[in-house]
Each structure stands twice: as structure tokens, then as C-alpha cells.
Amino acid sequence: MSERRKILILNPPQEVDSDFIDYPHFTGLPAWYLAERLTGCGHHVHVLDALAVRGADYFPLRNERGLFGVPHVSLLEPLRDADFDVAVIHFTPFVLSRRSEGLAYLLRRMRQWRPHSLLVGAELYTGGMHRVPTEGVRLRSDYPELDRFVSLEGERTLPNVVLETKNAVPFLVPGEVPDATLLAECSVPSFSSDWLAGSRAFLDRVGRLAKLRQYAVDGSALPVHFSRGCPFSCSFCTSPYRNYRAVPLPQVETFLARARVAGIERLFVLDDAANVRKDFPELLAMVDNAGMRLVLPNGLRADLLDRETVSALSRVTGELTVSAESASPRVQRELVGKSVTVDQVRQVAQWCSEVSLPLLVHWTVGFETETREEALATLEVARTMLDDYGARPLVQFPTPLPGTRLAAATGTGRSTKAMQHEPTWTPIGVEPDEFVRAVSLLRARASQSRAAKVIVNVTYRCNNHCVFCAVGNRSQQDLPADEIRRILERHWDQGIRQLDLDGGEPTLHPDLFEIIRFSVDKGFAPINVTTNGRRMAYPEFARALLTSGITGLLISLHGASAQVHDGITGSPGSFAETVQGLRNAVRLAPKSVDFGVNTTLSTRNFERLDALVELLAGLSVPRLNIQFLTPFGRAAAELVPDPDEAAAVVRRVIERWRDRMAFQVVNLPYCHLPGLEEYVAQDLGKLSRTMVFVTREEVNLYRYLAQTRRYDDSCRGCLYRVACDGRYDFAEVQD
């Protein structure tokens, strides 16, 4: 055949920002779609994918960048030995974003080795919102060895380009968008066994990266497009592919069969709008019948989902993502360009909750003309869906990427790195630091929403009688050791690995060391004990506890003198014993034990906090937890200090001592420590903690405490409501 050509398709290494978006680890897929098309045209085609050759991995580079694949020089030998009339080099958005010295070097050598061959750059179809506009002048300047460059999709255009001579003009050729019929011809590529093996080895290696681990990327997965394009046009998306085309179901079935034969268990569906196709339920049924699983990392359209489809999704995927963007109708209409409503997203969240399908929701805050009220509405709705249905919010800042309507409208252009980390605009009426902090708090709330720690009150007995004790009015009894073991076994089976042993006074439990040994042998870590420290005054006991296998110890001290501390504990001599216990802990604690002090502020001691910190610093205590009262047990309203006055003392102490001691403030609303909110953010840690009482009752610690919190007039319009339930109400103290 006179028109038959030897064609090399090269997918080069992908140089990315360390905090990349979209899927640079899956960029080999478009090369195989093109190979299927060119092979069907009668050409002899070979694919060289830098992400599937021996040694392919992720390599950190300088300037917060990294490389997927192999270093460019590792491709010199296979390229020198390759025999081709035409080389098509895949220019992904990651390659197009800036000149690559490594790729420029490869092209120079390819030109030296094959001076008469045609070198064609091609954008191809990768999907995702991260498209970089193709600029012919810049490309020709950066890579003068290229003879042609085909932008957009290339399966319809490249069969003609590869037959042209080197002198043909123009240099930049817009690719013709393949219709559904042509798409069907190249949507089921014949992957070579070598490529499959290399790609699977590569994905096994890079799957260790945190950003990929969350999607369970490994060698049992394969990327796929079941459709191309998105019929919608959100203002922050760079994609020009508005012509939506679905791969016909017969081709989907063929692809599933080939994947199953190849040992693939999961398909990463990279569609921009996977559920726009009208036969989406039939596709899910086909996947289910094939025994395959899907990963759907891009947000589905909530307005195109129904209860039955969500139920079908729960059988083929372990997680669902939808895009909501904003709770403000004006922002949606004027600034985003998305027609999805909050009610539609909330309905999907309810359906997902009913079938136990984890849901993630994309939210975007910080548009140029967005107001404080609009931003707060979005953050609060995101928090409500998290609390009510477990729908985890994925919060981003609107970023005017080059080529987006957002950039065109504002005359501003930024890189993808800003999306997660730094807003381009701040809502009207909001301080920049306040805005960033509020988004961070919502993200923290989401990250802490899954159970991770169990706190067991092993006893209600105590040798102190603190005036504010939360459990001081409960029956003085122990939780039997065999019952504690059963509790720990059950939580271990639920995936809980962190443990706190609390009370009452846990060191009074007769089987404490047996419980600790059981916990260590089971594998719990970290294991923390909170104590009043009085038995720690005895060196033998202190040494035994500190070397028992625990990893954390917190000793409670409420004053810098016997007068203050003993007056609060109602136990003369307790101050002397606790301080001696602190000395023993400082002296005997191994480096593996995280040691600190806890103090509870009340009207009896908050003004003397400076003196307490002076004492602790003199004892070389490394960490102090400052705890505000909660309305439980003996904590009467008259013991509660004015929060602003107490917060002023706390601020003074932190600002003076934070270079020498670590601080954590517990049970104080964020608004009382503006500028120091990071010291109270650990309150959110209670979201992941289950408290088990001596009575066997179990509660989520955060929600248990939140039941006595109330918003007042000063909370109206506060952005910290995304992670704060208001102030504690001591009008009625709980038992």
C-alpha cells in the first residue's frame, strides 16, 4: 500500500506542579486512541509512552515541581533505534503549559537521527478543565524541530497530516472534532501487552502519592473515556469541548470485555460529564454485569441524577462526586454559569446517605463580586450537608485560568496552583485572613468527620473532687476490664486505631496496665492517658506507666500554688503530688511519649494563668492544653469566667510563651482569639472521636458537646460558623 506509513506516537514525560490538577498519570490513554485510528487507516503504528517504560515513576524536581514517567534522557535509546516516517508527539496540557528543556532536547536528537521524517505535535483529547491554549508562534519558537502541530482532537485530522510533506503549510492545524460514529472506531484501543504491564507497574509505584492514594490508584486500574466533551460552560473551565459525544454502548461492552481479560478491576472514568448521556443507567448496569468497579473523579451533574441511578452507582463505585459550586442563585447564574441548585444537590446527598454511598461535593467561594452573605451561605450549606448526610465538601477558590471566561471577563490570569491555596478575590465585606481561615476551618471539619479515635472512660472514681468536673456527679464505679476489651475489639473492627484512656481518674482502675497491654498488642496507636498525676508522684508507678506502651500522657494541673489548685480539686495535698508527678514525668518520659499538661479555666484560676505557665516552663513541660468549661456535671454558671476576659489572658500567655511551649485551646469559640485561631482549631478533632462512658453509652464527642452550644446575635454573619456551634449555654447544666 503506497500510503502506508511507519508512525511513532510518543507520550513524553509529564512535568507538573507538585500540587497538580487533573490526571497527568493517565496521559498515555489518548496516544492509544490515536493509534487505533491510524492502524485502522492501514499504517504501522508503535506507541512509546514514557509513563509505561521500565523505571517509570514520580520524580520530585526543583521549584515545587515533579515528573511523571522517566527522565527524558532515558528515552534516547528507544528513540534512536526507532524506525519511523512520522512521529506524533503528544502535547498534553502539562507539556503545553511551559517550554520543556527535556522535550526540546529529545526533539533535537530525533531530528538529527531522522532528518527526513515528519515530526508532528498533537494536543489530542485528555479531558479535564486544565486546557492550555495552543499558540503556534510560541510552539514553533520553543520547538523548531516540529513540522506541524494539530490542536484539539486529532483522530479525524491526523490521518491526513501524516501523509503530508514536511513543507506543507500551515504549521498550526486545528483538529476536526470526531463525531460519535468516528469516536466509536477508536474508543476501544488494542493496548499492547508490554504497555499494559509497564503502565500497571507505573501506577503501582505512583499510587503511593497522597494525591493518588485517595482514588486508590494502582496497577489494577485503567483510564477510560466513555464520552467526550461537556455541553455546559462554567466560567472557570478552560475546556473548549462543548460538543458532547457518547461512546456507543456496544463499544463500551467491548472495552469492558478487553479490560476484564487484561485483569483490570477498576476503570477511571475521565469523562468531563459522565452522566449527561441518556443511557447512563444502562452503562452502569453493563459495568455491574461485567463485575467491574468505576472511579468517577470528575463531578457528575446532580440535576441529572435520580434515586435509582444513585442506587445503581452504589453497586459499581465506592464514592460519588457532584459539583454544586455556590449556594447563591446570583453567583450561580451570573458568575459560574451552572444551573444546578442547592436543593438538587441536597436531594442527591440524601439518596447517597440512604444507600451508604460516600459523597463529595465541589464548592467554590471567592468570586470577584461575591458578597460576605453569599460566601457565608455557601460555606454554611456545605457544612450542613456534611453534618446531615456526611457529604464531604471540596472547597476551591475561583481561579481565572488562561482561556477561561473568568479570565476574559476580569482581565486576570493565574495558574492552577491558586485553586486550592490562595484566593484571587476576597468576598465584599470580608477580611482576607478571615476568608482564608474560614475555608481552612471547613476543610478541617471535613477531614475530621470520620471516626478515628475512641475515648474510653475506664472509671468514674477519682481521688480529686474538682468543682467543675464533668462526670463528678456520676456513680463512682469502674468499667470492667473484660467489657473494655470488648469495646476495643468492636471499635478496632470498625477501623478505629487511636485510643484515649480517661476517667474519672484512670490510674485508679485496678486493671489499667492490663488494658494498656491489650491495646498495645492489638495495635492501637497512639494510646494516650489523661490523669491528675497524683500517683505519678511515686517514681515506680510513673516509670511503669511511662514505659507501658502508651504514646501520650496529659497531666491536669489547675494552678501554680496549693492554694489555687487544692481549692479547685477539693483535695488538700493534691498540688504537691501532681507537681511531683510532673517532675517524674519530665525526668522519666521516653522520647516516644508525647507529654503535656492540661488546665481548666474557671473564675478561680484564669487570672493566674501566667503564674501557672511560669511554673510549667520552669519544669520544662513542653505543651499546655488550656480548656474552657462545658456545661456538664458540676460546672455551674458561677464558675464560668467572662470569655473575653479569659481569652485576653490566654492571648497574653500564648504570645509570650509560644516560642517555648506548644499551646492548644479547647472549648473556646474561634472569634475570641482573632489572629490566633490555629490554637483553637483542634476543637474540630472531636468530630472524629467517639466517647464511651462507664455506663456503656457511646456518643460523638463533638456533637455531644455541641448540644449545649447556642448562637447569639454576635454570631450572625460570622464566617467561623462553618466550624463553630456557638457559645456554651450554662443556663441548664447537663448531668
Image: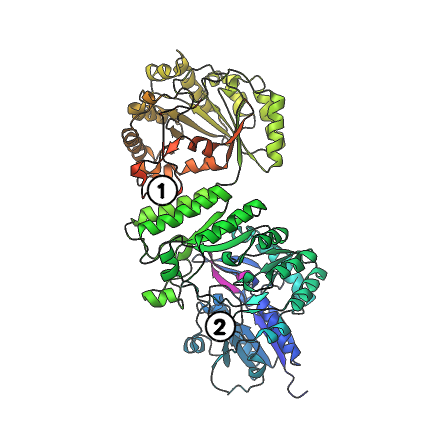
Q: Quadrant of the N terminus?
A: bottom right
Q: Position of residue 605 (x, y in %)?
A: 32, 21
Question: Relative to 673, is 551 on the left or the right?
Answer: right
- Magenta-drawn stretch contains 148: no
* Residue that lies at the very extreme toward the right in this rendered image: 261
Q: Identify the image quadrant of residue 489.
A: top right
Q: Position of residue 446 (x, y in %)?
A: 47, 44
Q: Identify the image quadrant of residue 640.
A: top left
Magenta span covers which residues?
A: 14-25
Instruction: Report if residue 84 is visible in the image.
Output: yes
Q: Please name the residue shown 61% across and 68% down the image.
A: 247
Query: Type of residue at label 2?
Result: Ala
Q: Quadrant of the C terminus?
A: top left
Relative vertical location of residue 554 with respect to residue 339 in this rendering, above or below: above
Label at residue 309: none
Q: Which residue is mark 2?
A: 104
**In-front residue for pair 715/616:** 715
Q: Which residue is mark 1?
A: 720
| Colouring method of the image | rainbow
- Magenta-drawn stretch contains 19: yes
